Amino acid sequence: MERTGVVVVGGGPAGVVCALLLARAGVEVTVLEKHGDFLRDFRGDTVHASTLTLLDELGLGPSFAEVPHRLVQRVQVLLDDGPVTMGDMSRLRGPHRHIAMVPQWDFLDLLADAGRREKTFALRMGTEAVGLLREGDRVTGVRYRTADGGTGELAADLVVAADGRRSLVRDAAGLPARGYGSPMDVWWFRLSRRSDETEGATGRFGGGSGLVLIDRGDYFQVAFLIRKGTDRALREEGVEAFRARVAALVPWLGDRVDEIASMDDVKLLDVRIDRLRRWHVDGLVCIGDAAHAMSPIGGVGINLAVQDAVAAARIVAGPLRRGALAPRVLAKVRRRRWLPTAAVQAAQRRVQDSFLAPVLAGGPGATAGKVPLPVRLVRRFPALQVVPAYVVGIGLLPEHAPGFARRAPERIERS
């Protein structure tokens, strides 16, 4: 049987960051990623201010600066009489007063290349974890299947489940999640953007739907909000009806809605909010979406997942090196990350229940007819723009790179 110190299941941001930090601590770590590459259609392409600071601490700032990206400083709501800035990142302190929008495959390639520079780091693409190995009640590794149909077993002192909101690993470990429900799903698509049009992230809501435009330079990444469970019925109405919905909500997009060639261009995100009651069993710990699925509200899911990864690596690295990784050590990961996770989910649920659910049910939204209280307050007291900017850009408990993982700034050659 093959053996490693830690096997990380899932090659997303949380999994690769956790593996990189553990490798820098001298722990042998293997990442299993079921896809053959990172070139997939991600929608979570945000790298937040606290994550950018983490990259600086890891010595990866110069390499990240060379990756094509777009900086976002403002989050806005579009009213009938113009935009209102809800969050202004320029009001933050520190070197990064913005969010970077970067293709996630470029971000993951950068992290993976940094990992490959460590002697104890291994990344196996096209390798999917299909089950857990156990000795009594303790998890001792994983069973895996490769893209060519081969199978094998990989023993480890610790399994890190970072395989997303539909985590096979957490289900195999018998860790139940508490779901909180959501009134919405999200359709993602692209529309072209002109240089003089709205920048940052801009939301428009009302009349039974909502839309968020994310500035990606020469195009908008568009999130169109629909009521939960209506995907099939709305698709059956056809692309012409959908184009009309978009143009009715934001009329100045009407001259380009034909860029939506068919409903195949519109991808569904099944929105869910859930959280594990317990994040670990003996020999296994969950992080990121595997521990807590987040709503796309605020776009904070990746930021929280990366912070989970940093906390987990810092907590388990020493005990792993000493051969003293007890369940009580793994329990510390949840204790460290529970408060920011629960607080953000509570805020997301509040926005969903008090604002988005009525809007998607056909009530008035952020229009001249009814401007929500938070929008009125921020419009009257612009200094309040720093509050959502901090929550989104920094987070309630930002994690910093432990000393063993820090490096001097350097440029890493991309593979």
Image: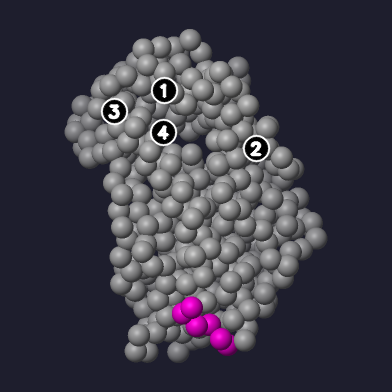
- For the C terminus, give its image quadrant: bottom right
Q: Earlier in the sequence, mark 4 or mark 2?
A: 2
In this view, the mark in front (2 or 3): 3
Q: Do the residues labelled 2 and 1 touch (CB within 8 Å)?
A: no
Tag 2: amino acid:
His
Residue at image x 47%, y 53%?
Answer: 341
Q: What element carries label 3?
A: helix
In this view, the mark in front (4 or 1): 1
Residue at image x 37%, y 16%?
Answer: 370
Tag 1: amino acid:
Pro
Q: Mark 2 points at which residue?
A: 98
> Range of the magenta residues?
323-328
Can you see residue 260? no
Q: What element carries label 1?
A: loop
Q: Quadrant of residue 69?
A: top right
Q: In this view, does 108 lie above or below 378?
A: below
Q: Which of marks 2 and 1 is nearer the N terminus?
A: 2
Q: Is mark 2 on a helix, strand or loop?
A: loop
Q: How is the image coloured?
A: one colour
Q: How crowded is mark 2: few (under 14 residues within 10 Å), some or many (20 or more)?
A: many
Label placed on residue 372: 1
Q: Quadrant of residue 217?
A: top right
Label placed on residue 358: 3
Q: In this view, does 277 lie above or below 341?
A: below
Q: Residue most toward the top?
A: 81
Q: Earlier in the sequence, mark 4 or mark 1?
A: 4
Q: Mark 4 points at which residue?
A: 223
Q: Earlier in the sequence, mark 2 or mark 3?
A: 2
Q: Are marks 2 and 3 in contact (CB under 8 Å)?
A: no
Of residue 275 and residue 155, the one placed in the foreground of this image is 275
Residue 188 lies left or right of residue 301; in this view the side is left
